[in-house]
Structures are given as C-alpha cells and as structure tokens.
Amino acid sequence: MKNILTISLLFAHAMFCSGQTIQDSILPHKAVYDKDGKLLSWYKPEVSGAGYDQVIDLASEFLLNCPVEPTTDLPLYMLYASFLPPPVVTQEKFDKGLSGFANDANVPACAFANFVQSLAVKYYAYTGNREYVDLVKFCLDHLIEHGTTPDDPSWKWNGVPYASANTKSIEYSGATHWGVGGRNDGPFVIEGDKVGEMGIAYLDFYKVLPEEKYLDAAIKCADALAKNCRFFDTGRSSISNDYPLISPWPFRASAENGQVHEQYTANVIFAIRLFDELIRLKDQLNISEEQVANYKKTRAFVWDWMYSMQGPVRTFVWKGYFEDMPNDKYNRNRVQNIPLETARYLLENPGEDQNLEVRIPSIIYWVASTFETEDHDGIKEQFGTYQPMGSHTARYASLCAMWYEQTGNAWFKEQAFRFFNWATYVCSEKGHVRVGPHTPKCWFTDGYGDYIRHFLDGMAAIPEWTPADENHLLKSTSVISEIAYTGKSISYSTFDEQSSEIFRLVSKPKSVSVNGNKLKADQYSWEELDEGGVLRISSDRGSERVIQL
C-alpha cells in the first residue's frame, strides 16, 4: 500500500511541479512571483496569506453593497446567477443595476445555500459582522415564500426549494429559458441534490437565527428526501448496458409527479449531513421517532450506495451538480466539486471511513490529474465547462490545506499555497470576482458563496495564513450563534454545549471562561507563532464563552 501511495504522490507531484507559464498579468492584476518563479498573491505578496483575508473581505463587502435591479428594487443576486463587471459594461450601467447576465438561468438554491455557509456561518464568526446574517436571512425568507414547491402531500416533492428560476423573476419555479430538456431544469423541476444542500443550509441558519421557519424548511427537505429515496440493490458486482447507473435520488425530477428528467447525481453528501444533524439533535428539535427511523434507514442506504460497486467512491462517476448543463443520461460529464466536498465531509467526520489515508489523497490526486490546468495553478470546473475557475481552484486548495493539517505532509501545504495564490487573482480591488481568465462574468455562486468559504477553511487549517495583527475565530465544531469582538474581549455563543474552537489572536489571552467559569490552563492551549499565536479551546461545559484579551 505504501508503494502505491508513493507512486501516486510522485505522479501528482510531477504533474503539478512541471512549472508555470510566467505572465505579466492575470485578469486585473499584475502577476507577482517569488525568486523561484512561483506565483504569489497579488495583495501584499511579501506577507504569507495576507491576500486570502483581503479577497474574502472584498468579495463579502461587495455583496453588502450589491447593485439593485431598478424594476424590482432587489439586489442582483436575487434575480441573476451572474453579472458583467466594469469595464465589460460601463460603470454607469453597472451602478444602475443593469449588468445582470440574462442568458444564465438564476440558481437561487445553490447560491443561497453557499451564502449560508460562507457568510452566515463562517464569515460572521470570523468578523462578528451581523449584517451578513441579515443578508442571508433576506435570501432565505424570499426562497421560502417565492421559491418552494407547494406544501401539498399530493406533490411528490412537496415543500422543497426549486434549484433554478428564470432571470429577473421574483418567483422561483424552475427555468424555462432554453426549453424543456435543454440547458436548464425546466418548469416545476427540482434537483434532488439541491434539496439536501438547501436542507442543511436551512438547519445551519436556524442554529444562527433560531426562527422556526428555518427548522421547518430543513425538516421538510429531509422528509422529502426520505420519501423519494429510490431503494435498490447495491450488491451487483458488475454493470451492464441494461443496468445503467442510477443514484438514490434523481438529479432532475418533476416536483409534482416525480417524473425523472435526469437519473444520476453523485452529490449526496449534503443530504447525509442533513440526516446526521437531525438524528443527532432529534430530542432537542422534537423530531418524531417515525421521522428519525426514516432518516436512519435512508441515510444507511445512501451511504452503502456511495461505497458500493455502483457508487462514486468506487466508480469515480462524480457528476450531476451544475444546473446549466444539458441532460447527461449517459453520465459522461465529470465534476470536481462533488468528490472534494465528499472528502471534506470525511475529514470532518473521520470515524465514517477507516481508510482515510487512502481515500482522501485518492480524491485529491484524481481532481489534480483530471482538472489540472497545464500552464498555471488553476483547477477546471467540469468536462462540460473545461476551464480553470477561481472558486474551484480555492476548493482544491482548501482540501489540500485540510489534509496537510491532518498529516503534516508539506507537499499538500505547498499545493494549498500555490492554488490559493492563483485563486486570489480572480477578485478585483472592487470585489468583482470573475469566474476565471476565460470568461468576463462574475457568478454569485462560484465567485461569492463558493469562493469565500474555501479561503476560510484554508486559514483554519493553516492559521499562520491569517493576519497576525487581528483577532479572528477560524473554526468551530459548532455553529456560532452570536459573537462580538472588542478591544478587550471576544464573547461568543455556540449552538452546542460541547464544541471546540480555533482562534488566531494578536497575543496570548489573559483568561478563557465558559458559562462564567474560568478554564484551567490545561483546558485550552496556546501556540506561539512568529507574531501572535493560535488559541484552541475544547469544552463541554456550556455554550457561553468569553476570551479576555
């Protein structure tokens, strides 16, 4: 086994250390290189990681000040999947909210689910700025009211979010722009995987802002997934032409009658996350025994399918995510985000797979070899759009950083550094996050919701890449419900009584308390860095925590 891993590592190392093409500029920035010709971040390249904090700040602040479409008085991210930034359009047109790109169907479920994770969960904890929670609340409230299938038991997929919508429409009910069966979902068609993705987003947001409508929305997603799971024999050891690959949920299906429009999606990990949390919190959230039994049964089947001879862990048929791809009934497309998000789940839940030392590198190496960009450190999105993109490059970098944190293998840290650096270049000084070097558009999914969180995960894994002159919560095993940073303290509340946190602090704290009781020195740890250090707290004594600075 060690020989196999060594060969794999050497293969990946050879592929990704073959050298970059030196460019004078990348998108709007002058390219900056070190003495060995390796690309550095465009912002403060002399300070390791400074550019990561800068681009997430710029991207997040752009959303707070996003142009408003004049006829609806709604921010562009409510009506469009993407927009054109200056100088592709005039500054005047942009400022007036007229730069939304009409030829891409809107993708509210994907965008808003990512907003929850990037803004309400991770960036709020990092900054303490409650405006981001308010922004996400506005999005979710609209999705519940204007983008959810009827709560009618006669509908196969009742009470769940639509993944897509027509541009500029305030009602989300599937996209019709390209015609049924074209490059879209079609009217009243849902995507099974987005039900899971939005379901766990609703639940996580409920932990930040405990209003019952978000919990109710999450439970409806879980109930619909359990009701519509397709239980079948996963024990077949061979695949034949008359036994095509299918998945527990179809990628596309009619919400009303369940008619399948596309059979297969490998993106089941968000549904598993949703079931995990509802099962874990069943008593606290008053989930019925019948529901819990359905969740357990469905979760067990989906997990077995993932690892079966028909499942993506073994077949590597990682496809079925992007809504703007035509129906792919032969499962020819491949994507990078599904395997990497599956790997993220496994790293965060290491007890689920006893073979992580093989599983995680195999996924990272597969993505590296399948979606490499030959002349620079960019990761391509999918076979259907085979172009390097900032958010997907940042995703790859974040998984490399997390695996480095787990193993101490310096090769993965180097990969994370190089690919994060390239990903910074897609963000302009005004917070316009371009898709990548081959397209002028900015997508609210890729460029914002799916971009910000990967840098935050990378900095949590490698805290030295966080600004040394600022205090930040980098990671918690629980969702942070409240947090306030002052000059003298950091006070915060965790959803769970038991949780662990990682902070990057300017100096060693004077004390740490949980529910008013000071922790002893052996109940938290302090790691000195060249400047400041890293505080790690782990406690099961309560959710109200204060760090005296």
Image (cartoon, rainbow, N blue to C red):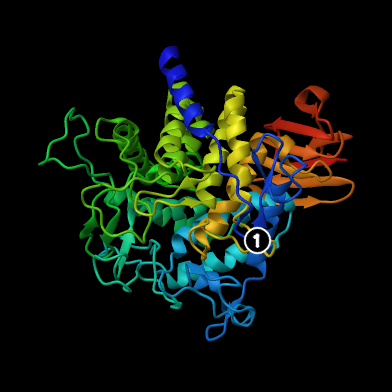
Say left or right for 148 vs 396.
Answer: left
Identify which residue is drawn at 29% across, 51% down: 227
Q: Position of residue 512 (x, y in %)?
A: 82, 35
Farthest residue in the left direction? 242
| Residue nearer the viewer, 465 or 185 | 465
Identify which residue is drawn at 27% across, 48% down: 264
Q: Quadrant of residue 35?
A: top right
Q: Quadrant of residue 323?
A: bottom left
Q: Which kind of residue does numbered mark 1 sit on? A: Ser
In this view, 372 is above or below 15: below
Q: Secondary structure at mark 1?
A: loop
Farthest residue in the bottom direction? 71
Residue 284 shows in this picture: no
Identify which residue is drawn at 34% across, 70% down: 175
- 10 Å crowding of disc 1: few (<14), some (14-19), many (20+): some
In this view, 135 is above or below 425: below
Identify which residue is drawn at 82% across, 24% down: 521
Q: Quickly name the residue at label 1.
A: 428
Q: Position of residue 450 (x, y in %)?
A: 53, 53
Q: Position of residue 545 (x, y in %)?
A: 76, 41
Q: Position of residue 51 (x, y in %)?
A: 71, 48
| Residue nearer the viewer, 192 or 256 | 192
Say left or right for 401 vs 346.
Answer: right
Residue 93 shows in this picture: yes
Quadrant where the C terminus lies? top right
Quadrant where the N terminus lies? top left
| Residue nearer the viewer, 394 or 201 | 394
Say left or right for 70 vs 143.
Answer: right
Q: How many marks?
A: 1
